[in-house]
Image (cartoon, grey):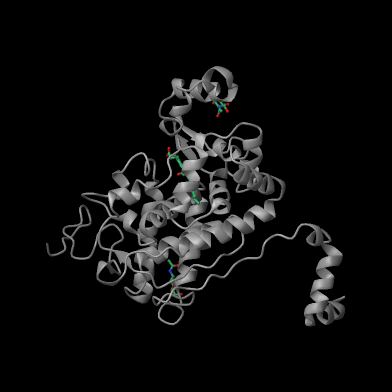
Amino acid sequence: MAWSCRAVLAKPMGLILTALLFFPAALSAPTPPLISLPTEDDGLSYGFHDHKCPALLNNVSTAVRNARRSDPGITAGLLRLTFNDCFPQGCDASILLTGPNSEQDILPQNAGLQQGALDLIESIRAKVHRACGPTVSCADITNLATREAVLQSGLPRYEVPLGRRDSIAPARRQDVEALPRPDFDVHQLVQSFRSRGLDETDLVALSGAHTIGEAGCGSFENRFSSEEINTNGFVKRLLDNCTVNADRRQDLDVTTPMKFDNKYFTNLYRGIGVLSSDMALLLDVNTRSKVKDFAGDQEWFFRQFSNSMSKLAHRQGAKGNNAEIRNHCFERNNGGPFVGMGFKASA
Ligand code: HEM
Ligand SMILES: *[C@@H]1O[C@H](CO)[C@@H](O)[C@H](O)[C@H]1NC(C)=O
Ligand SMILES: *[C@@H]1O[C@H](CO)[C@@H](O)[C@H](O)[C@H]1NC(C)=O
């Protein structure tokens, strides 16, 4: 057995034959391959920190593993954080800045960000800077921690371009307000993603992040004032639960809330998606056909999700004089006092 394995594996042709023997489905339904996008000509690369910070990937994966063990919901928090950071003006950790004009205060787009996810990024930064000095940005750490949480959820590894720097200011309000809202119809969703170089496939695949995580009642209250409330028993149950407790956190995937799987898509077919923007994906021929693909083939969804996350991670953020390696993820360097940090930067 051992020799025949080695003999077969030695030749790529043998590999293909073996794959066809054991996975005949690979012939009929090829899942798309993982992509490797070029890193832009702005000094980014996949191996950017390999020499100066060899501890990086290991420090990130250990921290994410520990965090997920004590708080399984943090994977959802990290995913949302990365989307809401990268979408407005590129991945630059601008969303982590606290204080005046903080993106975190812009509602409803940034409602319900998990403080635990924000804190995890800063605590990883502290560990990494202790091991390597201040060479890795909060933007890189945010993308890597999210990639790690996705990986630990059983999805394929996607590539994240590294060497990014952190913005010195929050994103402009109009760019944060370009984030899709949960009351958008499908055309608004498509337009919104298009405005940031993301297509319908990215829209549907990335919406699949709602296979985990939670929403506040305010994020789907638009459904309660529509005609739906009289005709849709599921929406009525959502309303009843929110009436009992207006502060409840509603699972976005009511079937398997804790599991990263493709049940989000089968839920849409059953009419039990929570946000209007989730159900809306059935109301356009293109997005509907993607929902069907992903509902029918979890591996296909996983591959496409990873590819679309990689595309998101490639969005260019602040650079040049508008960027730096932050010494604390919540404050720009020399940007005034850290509240509650036990010391003051020179103001
Ligand atoms: C397609 C347009 C999208 C809309 C309209 C949307 C909207 C929302 C809203 C309103 C919430 C609930 C916030 C709250 O009430 O606390 C939410 C949660 C979430 N979103 Fe999205 N989202 C979209 C796309 C995405 C994408 C692309 C990702 C990541 C790839 C993502 C990941 C998440 C996750 C993981 C949660 C749960 C967060 C938690 O449990 O802390 N969403 N989203
Ligand atoms: C980070 O990596 C360094 C070098 O491998 C290691 O000494 C340190 O213990 C790691 N820290 C954490 C918290 O994983
Ligand atoms: C409403 O609350 C009940 C009781 O906690 C729960 O069993 C049910 O799943 C909730 N409904 C929805 C749609 O989440």
Q: Residue 6 in the image: state x and y as whole percent.
A: 81, 80
Q: Percent x, y for residue 137?
A: 35, 68
Q: Quadrant of the C terminus?
A: bottom left
| Image position of 31 with respect to 321: above or below | above
Residue 67 at what x, y percent from top left? 47, 54
Q: Image quadrant of ligand 2?
A: bottom left
Instruction: Determine whether, in the image, residue 126 is placed left or right of residue 215.
Output: left
Up the image or down, 324 lies above or below 193; here it is below
Left or right placement of residue 214 versus residue 333 in this view: right
Total marks shown come to: 0
Tell me which residue sits at (57%, 70%) in the image.
Answer: 36
Q: In the figure, is residue 195 to the left or right of 97?
A: right
Quarter location, residue 155? bottom right
Return the residue nearer the eye: 7 or 129: 7
Pick the residue in front: 294 or 73.
294
Residue at the spot x=34%, y=71% of the render? 130
x and y percentages locating residue 127 in the rendered image:
38, 67
Mark yes or no: residue 188 visible.
yes
From the viewer's side, name the closer residue of 81 and 247: 81
Instruction: Looking at this view, name the residue that lies furthest to the top.
Output: 230
Q: Quadrant of the N terminus?
A: bottom right
Residue 275 visible to an observer of this rendering:
no
Q: Is residue 174 left or right of residue 75?
A: left
Residue at 53% x, 22% y is 228
Farthest residue to the left: give it: 347
